[in-house]
Image: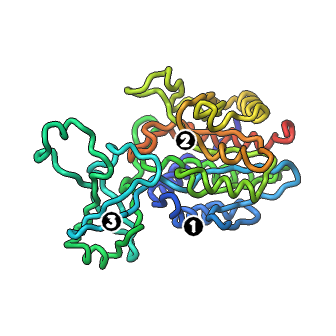
Amino acid sequence: MEKGGNPKEIKSLLEKFTNAHGISGFEDDVRELLEKEIEPYVDTIRKDNMGNLIAIKKGEGPSIMLAAHMDEIGLMVRYIDDNGFLRFVGIGGWFDQTLLNQRVVVRGKKGFIPGVIGSKPPHVMKEDDRKKPVKIEDMFIDIGAKDREDAENLGIEIGTTASIDREFVSLANGKVTSKAFDDRAGLVILIEVMKRLSKHKIEANVYAVGTVQEEVGLKGARTCAFGICPNLALALDTTIPGDHPGINKTDSSLEVGKGPVITVADASGRGLIAHPQVLKWLKDTAVENKIPYQLGVGSGGTTDATSIHLTKEGIPTGTVSIATRYIHSPVEVLDMADIEACISLIVKAIENVGRYF
């Protein structure tokens, strides 16, 4: 395996991206950050109608789309009550209990406003209610407003978005925790791959794409793949390991720290069944370069790859993911060694793609 990048720089970049806020449909800040970080390593860069960012390194060989989504799951204000409390809906796949009593950042018209998610206290609940999980429709955001007019004067309106107020923190043994590793980890991998590829000539024509609205229907990847129509594609994302209490190895055999995950199938085949030649290309590359990897077969979620591989007459597509604990929560956990191994795998695969496609 070739010498890797600077671990401190990669970690700092991941911190910068996870601390940024950008829920589905409102990815502007993240896109601006991605454009700034990736621009030095590509030939051209543009934004399409949906808001996807498309950075291109030109080559004469096969065209490859690398897709990592910019959006994170979040909240949207649906009602402001007379006392200034904000009722909201979830944008993306929340497990309601992870939201209760969290601090949030509300993106008002006049700037970011801190808030907290509250609900009826257990002290005044009936005994039966105490035994039930609190539903998202029974929660509200408290920004300290006096009443509805005060909340509106602070810049809140119907459709105002909010995201979790959590920042990147290092744990023991190379692990880190933050919100939104799904999929800011993929964006960091995308940037570092293009950085390493920029240092020498490659045959492939690479489209490095930050996609929008993945968490609400894989939307940006669908339109972008149609516009680009690449010869093949890889989605860069996160996936669920089975290496912590509450989940069995029979549910997921994946482990944090054991290398990137090459998806064979997800969502029990309703999502992506990876193209056989893409699988061979990725597995051969990993073995030849002594890069650790894991194979993933999942019954639950899927990625941008599902939309991409069904575009036009079909695009050979795969997914490479980082095993991440507690996905879709404010405290996701991954291992930085997996990030480095994933970058190395993608770089080496792009360098030898002509042997397979």
Label 1: state its secondary structure: helix
Residue type, mark 1 in image = Glu
Picture quadrant of residue 146? bottom left
Report the label total.
3
Q: Quadrant of the C terminus?
A: top right
Q: Earlier in the sequence, mark 1 or mark 3?
A: 1
* 308 and 240: which is toward the camera: 308
Judged left or right of residue 260, residue 178 is left
Viewer-closest of 39 and 277: 277
Q: Label 1 to label 2, Cα distance in Å?
A: 22 Å
Q: Position of residue 242 (x, y in %)?
A: 47, 27
Whether pointer 2 and pointer 3 mark residues with C-beta atoms closer than 8 Å, the reply is no
> What's the distance in space between the residues labelled 1 and 3, CA to CA?
30 Å
Classify mark 3: helix, strand or loop: strand
Residue that lies at the very extreme toward the left in this rendered image: 123
Question: Which of the two residues, 208 or 158, is positioned nearer the viewer here?
Answer: 158
Going from N to C along the chain, the mark reached first, 2 or 3, is 3
Q: Position of residue 285 (x, y in %)?
A: 75, 33
Mark number for residue 79? 3
Question: Which quarter shows the N terminus?
Answer: top right
Question: Within 10 Å of the Cα at label 1, are there few (<14), some (14-19), or many (20+) other Cα atoms?
Answer: few
- The residue lying at 51 percent from left, 64 percent from top is 26
Query: Pointer 3: residues within 10 angstroms few (<14), some, or many (20+)?
Result: some
**Camera-side mark, 2 or 3:** 3
Residue, x 40% and y 61% (percent of image)? 76
Nearer-N-terminus badge (1/2): 1
The disc labelled 2 sits on which kind of residue?
Thr
Work out which residue is located at the far top of the displayed protein and give it: 250
Q: Which residue is mark 1?
A: 32
The residue beneath circle 2 is 238
Q: CA distance from mark 2 to mark 3?
A: 33 Å
Residue 94: tell me if it is visible: yes
